[in-house]
Structure formats: C-alpha cells, structure tokens
Image (cartoon, grey):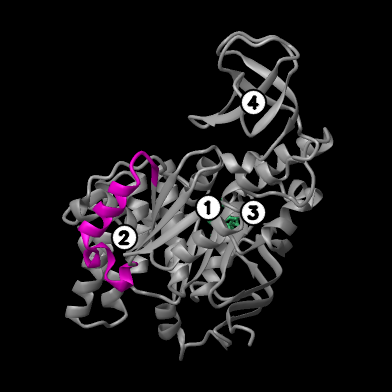
Amino acid sequence: MSKMNAIRTSGLHYIYADGTVALSDVDFEVKHGEKIAVLGPNGSGKSTLFYHFNGLIKPSRGEVQIFDERISKNNIDDIRKRVGLVFQNADSQLFCHTVLEDISFGPRNIGLDQGKIENRVEWALRRFNLEQFARKNPANLSAGQKKRVAIAGVVAMEPDVLVLDEPTTGLDAGGITDTMELLDELNNEGKTIIMSTHDSDLAAGWADRIYVLNKGKVFGSGIPGHIFANEKLITEAGLKHPVIVSTFREFKARGISKGELPLSVLDLMESLDTKIMNIRCAIASCDIQAGDDVSIRMKDGMLVAEKCPGNVIGKAVSDGKKGEDIAVKDVCGDLVALTGQITIIRVPGIIEGGSRAVHMEKVQGILEKNKGRKIGAMGTSAKVLTGKMGIRCDFEFDVAQSGILAALRGFDVIIFVSGRMADRVLEKVKGRNIKHTSFVL
Ligand SMILES: Nc1ncnc2c1ncn2[C@@H]1O[C@H](COP(=O)(O)OP(=O)(O)OP(=O)(O)O)[C@@H](O)[C@H]1O
Ligand SMILES: [Mg+2]
C-alpha cells in the first residue's frame, strides 16, 4: 500500500505584497514517514514554501494539502498540532522569559493539560541537553543554544510532521551531528521530517529524497543519487557539488573509480576499482629494496610492508627505508581478511525506556570481553548510556560509517546505538561483508 501524503502542493504560486514572485508553480509532495531535504540557494523560496505548510501564509494561486486536506479555518488548529515549523531565525520563535516557558508554550498552546505539559517539557529539556539552561532567558543564549531551544519547543508538541528551516545553520560540528541524529531518531519513530538547507553535502548524506529549489521553481526532485548525478542541474541551480561527488568524478576521469555515484566516504572507497588496484602503497616496516618479495598487513589502521611471509604478498617497486612509504606491485591475497569485527549493542530507544532500562553489569561484561576496541555511540539513549558509564568514545561524528571504515582498516569496533536505528546500522554492516555480532540490552 502506498503511504499517504503528509504534504502536497500543486501549482503553488506566492507573490509578496511588493510584487516579488517568491514561488511559481511549485508541485511538492511528501509521503508520511519520509525524510526530505529542500535544497536551494539564498532567496530560492525555501522559507516561503515552508510558511505554507502550517498556514502562516496563503497561496496566491494553487493549493496546499496537509494529510490530503486543504487548509481552512476549520482545520487550521488541528494542522498546527500535526505540522510543527521550526523557523530559520530562532529569535522569531523565542519570546518568553525563560527557556522552560518557551518550550512549554507550544504544548500549552495546543491545549494539553498541565501534567502532560510538564512531562513533555521535562523530556524535551533532557533530550536536547538543555536542563542547565531551563531558567535562563533565551535572549541571553548563544545562537546555537537558541536554535536547540527552538527545535526542542516544536518537538515537545509531538507533531507528526516536523518542518525545519535551515536547522543546522550556525551550529558547530557537534551540534550539526546531534541535530541530524535526532532528526533520524524522530524519523525512525515514525515522524515525517522536512528540512531546508543550502548545504549539498548535508542533504546528500541524509535525505531520502531531495527537492532542488531555485528562483521559486522546482528544478528537480528525486533520490540523492539521482539529483547529484545531474551535474548540470546542480550547477544551474547555483549549488555546490558534494565533496564526495567531485572527488569521485576526478577519480573516475583518471580511471581509478567506477560504478554508481557515491554519496559517502564508504561508498567512495567502494567505487575504487580494486581489480586493477593490484598496486598498493604501504609503510616499510624495515629497509626494503626494489624487487624484494614483501607481505602486507594491517597495523594500527595502516598497511605495512614487511619481509616475513604473510597472506597478502607482492613485490616492492622502489627502495624504502624503515618508516617510508613504498609502492608494492602484483599484490595478491585476501585483504578483506585483514578487516576487524564490529559489535553492535542496541540500547533501548527513548520510547522504550532509554538507558534507564539497561543493566550496567551486562554492558560491563561485554566491554570486559572486548577490550581495546574502538567505540562509538549514536542516538540519544546510547550517548546517555556511554556518558553515564564513563565510556570514552572514539567516534563522535557519523558513527555508523566511521565504525565501518575503522573495521575496514583492521580495527575491532563496538557501536552503541539507540532503538530502531540499530537495524539500519546492522544492515549497513551486513552489506559490507564485515564480521559482526550484535547484542540487545
Ligand atoms: N516579506 C517579504 N516581502 C517581499 N519579498 C520577500 C519577503 N520575504 C521574502 N521575500 C523574497 O522572496 C524570495 C524568497 O525568499 P525566501 O526567504 O523564501 O528564500 P530562502 O530560500 O528561504 O532564502 P535563504 O536561504 O536566504 O533563507 C526572495 O527573493 C526574497 O527577497
Ligand atoms: Mg530561508
């Protein structure tokens, strides 16, 4: 069964009072449960489009449907409960005297009773790591903190559809990762997420589908692989090609890479034509002369060439002193056998009780048996758990991909992951032929 539309516009035009045509003939469709990025340069109409989604402005022409209903006086209150809009500028959203009041505003406004409001606000403060700011005046927070409060206030209303206008602008690397991870978590819990950005790299790695907007028009839409494969579309829309995509095009032009367009470092690595790559660079573990038979192994995440026999062998191309980079040709043997293992530990998601539902002894036991591994945590409850247990994490950003890349470099890895996100990580690991085990806490 095809999923229902969360939001649909057809032939949407919007003209501002001064005559500026901000949107023209926009057809836009989002199925319930999708993760959509609206990608466009400054002034392309992203914010104007989003204002239509909860009835802040009315189309000059065309129509907007929310869950298959046109917005009208009769349903506008209901629509504002179902569609939560986080403004581009946090200052236009925050107006109370304390963070606590600001986050309570939305839930109160949609008519929840006091007990429910308190629960949700407490939960949102915790989830967004804002407890220490609860009594502070939002006007005195940093730009990144304000942004977090604005998102928390909307999430606290528990809308079915979350619309975020440039949620990562002004956030630092940690803030961006946290925000994107949180959006993934909410999506896994069944929410539809629509966000705008002008960051091609961000959209490429995150969205199920992308709409490219320019000068108020839809330039294209589709899955990220399809959108970024269209070089002309991206250039003409005034956007940047993702770094991975530009790198791949260079590699491909030089005959090193092949196949489908990669959108992550991991996919880029897999685009390398390993069959013709029977020449490798490695660090000499002792003085080596050109023509020497050497073996290659993985050590501390790097390839090392040595003279004792091993599974992967080849011939040194040039002389190299101990510690220098050398090239090894005619490489044969199974490099995959050099990869490490991944242990996936599923931590109950927030809606399943979170880290409080976990027996610490069980975690201690697993860690005892797996000493010396690289560790990463993704998702709120996984991060809370590792934080509570004082476990130092090696990966902070892009944990699933970082873990797989580390395993491919020979490290053994543990990934703590919240709730249903664990299934996605497991799928990714399985797809890479990496030895793995998983535990459910
Ligand atoms: N209140 C307004 N009155 C007149 N024109 C406006 C108004 N708000 C926006 N515009 C114009 O409408 C167009 C689309 O603006 P919009 O804010 O939707 O773009 P955007 O894609 O969100 O840009 P940005 O990336 O800078 O946030 C722009 O040309 C802008 O100048
Ligand atoms: Mg905008």
Q: Which-is-in-front pick, marks 1 and 3? A: 1
Badge 1 density bin: few <14, some 14–19, many ≥20, Cα 10 Å: some
Q: Is residue 350 magenta?
A: yes
Quadrant hosting residue 350: bottom left
Q: Earlier in the sequence, mark 1 or mark 3?
A: 3
Q: Which-is-in-front pick, marks 2 and 1? A: 1
The one nearer the camera, 67 or 323, is 323
Residue at left 79%, top 53%?
230
Which residue is identified by label 1? 435
Q: In the displayed structure, does residue 109 sit left or right of residue 307? A: left
Marking on residue 40: 3
Q: Earlier in the sequence, mark 4 or mark 3?
A: 3
Task: Pinpoint residue 246: horizontal percent, then vertical percent.
Answer: 72, 39
The one nearer the camera, 438 or 194, is 438
The answer to whether marks 1 and 3 mark residues whose Cβ atoms lie closer than 8 Å is: no
Tell me the kind of residue under disc 4.
Ser
Which residue is identified by label 2? 381
Task: Pinpoint residue 94: horizontal percent, then vertical percent.
Answer: 32, 59
C-alpha gap between disc 2 and disc 1: 25 Å
Q: Does the beta carbon of the residue at mark 3 sit less than 8 Å from ligand 1?
A: yes
Secondary structure beneath label 4:
strand
